[in-house]
C-alpha cells in the first residue's frame, strides 16, 4: 500500500488506484499510516517543487477522507444505538409472550397423535416411549399423543391389548376404552374392548389396576391378580370373577384358549384370527366349548368343533354357516 500512496502523492495514481486508496483509508487504523507515509514523502521532497494542482488534489482527498470517516463514525454510533433500542423493544415484547407460553399447559397446545394398528389375523408387538410393552391383537388400534411419557401416559384402545406397563408412580398409565378407564402404575394386564361388543373385559395378571367408569370418577373398582372385571356398556356396571389369566392371554403367543365359552362368544375370536366371516344357527349359539388352538388351520379347527358339538360348517360364498345338526345332537345325548 506504501507504493500506492507514493504514486498518489506524486500525482501518478490512476482513477482505479485512487478508488482503492480511498477504500483502504476508510478502514480503521489506516489513516495514521497514510499520514506517516505522507510525512515521509514530504520530507523527501523538501526543496523540490510540488505542482499546485497536486497539492489541491491532496487537500481534497484529505478533506474527503475526514468527511467520510466522520460520517462513518456517526453511522456506527447510530447503528449501535438503533440495535440497543431494538434489543430493548424485542425483549419487552418477548417477555410477556414467554411468560404466557411457559405457563400454558401442554394440553392446550396442538397435540399430534400416534396410531398403532394391527390388521386382520395379525398380532403387533411394540415398545412405547416409556418402555411399556404392548401386544395388540387382530384388528386393534392404540393411540397416544406427543406428550406421552413426558406429562402423561394416556392411551386409547379399540380392540384387545396385553400391556406390560413400565413402573412410574409419578405418571400413572391410563387406558381409555369406550367409557371405562383403567389406571395402573406398573403391572401386567389384558384389556378386551372391541367396538360393537357389549362387554369390556380387564384381566389382571400381576400388580394392581383401578377401574373408573366415565362420569362416575368417585366410584372406583380395584382388581387383584387373577381377577377379571367385566364391564357392561349398556348396564354401566362392573362384576368381578376369579379366573386363570393365562386362559385369556394366550393369543399374544399366537394361541387361543376357550374355557367353557359359548359358540357365540368364540366366533368373534375365530373371525379375527382367521379373517373369516361366520354366521351361527340360533340353535347352536349356546353350545359351549373348551379347547386350545395353536397352529391349527381353520379346516382343522372346524373339524375339531364339529366333533365336540353337533355343529356342521357349511360354506356359502365367503361365509361359513355353523349349522346345528339335530341328528348328531340326539346321538351325543344317547351316548351320554
Image (tube, helix red, strand yellow):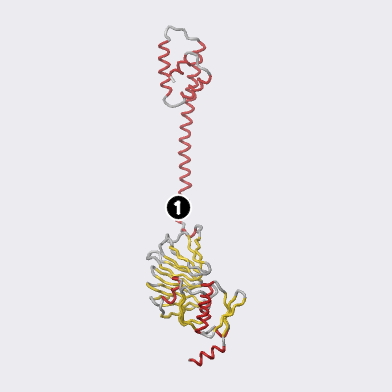
**Label 1 belongs to which residue?**
99
Q: What is the tally of numbered marks visible in this picture?
A: 1
Task: Work out which quarter of the rendered image holds the N terminus and state it.
Answer: top left
**Front-most of 242 and 147?**
242
How busy is the neighbourhood of tag 1: few (under 14 within 10 Å), some, or many (20 plus)?
A: few
Vertically, is 297 above or below 61? below
Counting from the top left corner in percent of width and height, residue 331 is at 53, 90
**Residue sitting at 45 percent across and 26 percent down?**
27
Residue at the spot 46% in from the left edge and 32% down from the top edge = 77
Q: Position of residue 258 (x, y in %)?
A: 47, 79
Closest to the observer, 291 or 124: 291
Above or below for 54 versus 335: above
Residue sticking out furthest to the right: 317
Instruction: Give residue 35's position: percent from left, percent from top.
Output: 42, 18
Using the image, determine if residue 101 lies above or below residue 14.
below
Please tell me whether mark 1 sits on a helix, a strand or a loop: helix
Left or right: 326 with respect to 206? right
Query: Where is residue 116 drawn, in percent x and y?
Result: 49, 63
Amino acid at each position: 500500500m506504501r507504493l500506492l500512496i507514493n504514486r498518489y502523492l506524486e500525482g501518478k495514481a490512476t482513477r482505479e488506484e485512487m478508488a482503492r486508496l480511498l477504500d483502504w483509508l476508510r478502514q480503521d487504523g489506516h489513516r495514521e499510516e497514510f499520514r506517516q507515509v505522507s510525512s515521509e514523502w514530504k520530507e523527501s521532497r523538501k526543496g523540490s517543487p510540488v505542482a499546485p494542482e497536486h497539492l489541491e488534489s491532496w487537500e481534497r482527498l484529505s478533506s474527503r477522507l475526514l468527511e467520510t470517516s466522520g460520517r462513518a463514525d456517526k453511522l456506527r454510533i447510530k447503528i449501535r444505538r438503533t440495535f440497543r433500542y431494538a434489543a430493548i423493544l424485542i425483549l419487552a415484547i418477548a417477555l410477556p409472550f414467554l411468560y404466557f407460553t411457559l405457563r400454558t399447559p401442554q394440553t392446550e397446545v396442538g397435540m399430534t397423535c400416534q396410531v398403532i394398528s394391527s390388521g386382520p389375523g395379525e398380532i403387533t408387538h411394540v415398545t412405547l416411549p416409556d418402555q411399556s410393552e404392548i401386544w395388540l391383537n387382530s384388528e386393534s388400534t392404540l393411540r397416544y399423543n406427543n406428550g406421552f411419557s413426558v406429562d402423561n401416559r394416556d392411551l386409547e384402545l379399540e380392540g384387545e391389548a396385553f400391556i406390560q406397563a413400565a413402573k412410574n408412580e409419578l405418571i400413572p398409565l391410563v387406558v381409555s376404552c369406550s367409557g371405562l378407564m383403567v389406571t395402573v402404575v406398573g403391572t401386567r394386564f389384558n384389556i378386551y374392548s372391541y367396538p360393537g361388543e357389549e362387554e369390556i373385559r380387564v384381566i389382571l395378571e400381576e400388580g394392581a389396576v383401578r377401574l373408573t367408569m366415565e362420569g362416575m370418577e368417585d366410584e372406583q373398582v380395584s382388581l387383584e391378580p387373577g381377577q377379571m372385571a367385566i364391564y357392561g356398556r349398556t348396564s354401566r356396571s362392573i362384576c368381578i370373577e376369579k379366573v386363570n389369566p393365562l386362559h385369556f392371554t394366550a393369543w399374544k403367543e399366537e394361541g387361543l384358549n376357550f374355557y367353557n365359552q359359548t359358540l357365540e362368544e368364540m366366533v368373534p375370536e375365530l373371525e379375527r384370527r382367521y379373517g373369516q366371516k361366520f354366521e351361527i344357527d340360533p340353535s347352536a349359539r349356546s353350545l359351549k366349548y373348551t379347547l386350545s388352538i395353536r397352529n391349527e388351520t381353520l379346516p382343522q379347527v372346524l373339524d375339531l368343533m364339529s366333533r365336540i358339538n353337533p355343529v356342521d360348517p357349511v360354506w356359502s360364498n365367503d361365509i361359513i354357516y355353523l349349522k346345528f345338526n339335530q341328528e348328531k345332537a340326539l346321538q351325543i345325548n344317547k351316548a351320554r
